[in-house]
Amino acid sequence: MKAAQQGDERFDVLIIGAGAAGMLCAMTAAQQGRSVLLLDHKRKLAEKIRISGGGRCNFTNLHAAPQHYLSHNPHFCRSALARYTPQHFITMLNRHGIGYHEKSPGQLFCDDGSEAIIAMLKTECDAAGVRWCTPGEVTQIGGGKGFCVMTTRGEYHAASLVIASGGLSIPKIGATPFGYKVAEQFGVPVTHLKPGLVPLSFHPQEWSIYAELAGVSLDAIVSFGKHSFRESLLFTHRGMSGPAILQISSYWEPGKPLSIDLFPDDDPHQLFSQHRAGKMLLDNFLAQYLPQRLANIIAGQWAENKPLNQCSEKELKRLADRLKNWQITPTGTLGYGKAEVTCGGVDTLALSSKTMECNEVPGLYFIGEVVDVTGQLGGYNFQWAWASGHAAGMAIRAQS
């Protein structure tokens, strides 16, 4: 890495945040002949890439499209996603000889681990001539004609400034509200922020009967409003996690219940009817379709655990309805410390969907998680980082 000299230097563009979006933007702008300085307050680059996918990095999703993203302006992401697709990133991987595999439909993971992705992006940045300032904490940003950025490593000037500092999720790896403060400084609106792709918690007293299920998982459909996800659901000591819960958490609104279908492939009422004459205890019958520990609790708490032939039609109908539509209201989430992303961000109505540049502040760009575009689980957020970074990198002009 070629480090920037300490002192007063001028660049076409200064990018704050050496994560997925920032590095993709830096290499793209430098490849267009722009002089680029990439700053980050941490010495280690791209910590979110490093820890993603258990270190395997789910770097994109082949099905990346606007319907897999949340935003107050749902069409905003369309342009960037169309101009930098998963295939563009795959082409770069192939050029570097980095293997990958499809784990779930559309979800691509790196064979060689997250470090290979980080090393590839660093190599591309270095080859294009990107200068680095890491670690370098920004102490002040001045506007006017271009931007003056004062840091603990010196003062730098640039015609354009890109904010790629991420959101509030996972503060232990360096997340801060920096990007939102920059937006505020320049009068750029920020939408409501909340943790996304995050486990949900429940009232301890209400949850006490389920807490002993910690570690139990099953296939389920979890719904909120018009959104439904069929994936694994995991019971925890404090509530629920697993892909289905993480997905719905981004849509869930406090104070409102979730609907959970514990029998996604079957009609439990029909199953009960077919076996009404049997003498099998209810918990053992349910254990044919559900984990035994969950079946025990359902039979003991939601109904009376007795042989099927002793259950009334009314009892079985009530239980079947609850198994297909378990209504339960979370008290909250486990917060940004356990969230994979931040929902909300810099208001997309203030940005150009083609360039990520602020409409009212020429030369100021926001990309990646700091923007009000949040992907679903499964590689969509990295694809937004690549696409938004590329859009800004291609648009940045040289100093006049």
Image (spheres, rainbow, N blue to C red):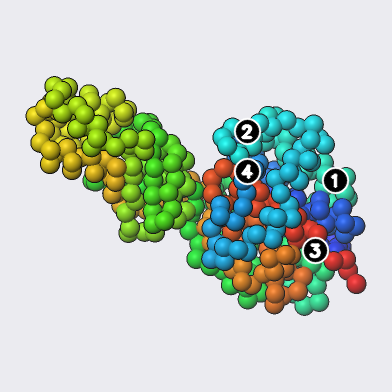
| Earlier sequence position, callout 3 versus callout 2 | 2
Which residue is nearer to you in this view: 368 or 335? 368
Helix, strand or loop under label 2: strand
Q: Nearer the viewer, mark 3 or mark 2?
A: 2
Which quarter of the rendered picture does the C terminus lie within?
A: bottom right
Q: Which residue is mark 4?
A: 61
Label 1 near label 4: C-beta < 8 Å?
no
User: What amino acid is labelled 2 in the image?
Assistant: Glu
| Earlier sequence position, callout 4 versus callout 1 | 4
The reply, left or right, for residue 56 in relation to residue 355 is: left
Label 1 near label 3: C-beta < 8 Å?
no
Residue lying at 27% horizontally and 26% vertically, measured from the top left: 287
Q: Which residue is mark 1?
A: 126
332 above or below 274?
below
Q: Which residue is mark 2?
A: 102
Q: Nearer the viewer, mark 4 or mark 1?
A: 4
Number of the label disc, if any, that sits on residue 395: 3
Label 2 near label 3: C-beta < 8 Å?
no
Where residue 238 sits, quadrant-wise, is top left
Distance, label 3 to label 4, CA atoms, is: 25 Å
**Can residue 141 be seen by looking at this rendering?**
no
Mark 4: few, some, or many residues within 10 Å (few <14, many ≥20)? Answer: many
The reply, left or right, for residue 85 in relation to residue 4 is: left
Residue lying at 31% horizontally and 28% vertically, measured from the top left: 289
Q: Nearer the viewer, mark 3 or mark 1?
A: 3
Residue lying at 82% horizontally and 36% vertically, measured from the top left: 95
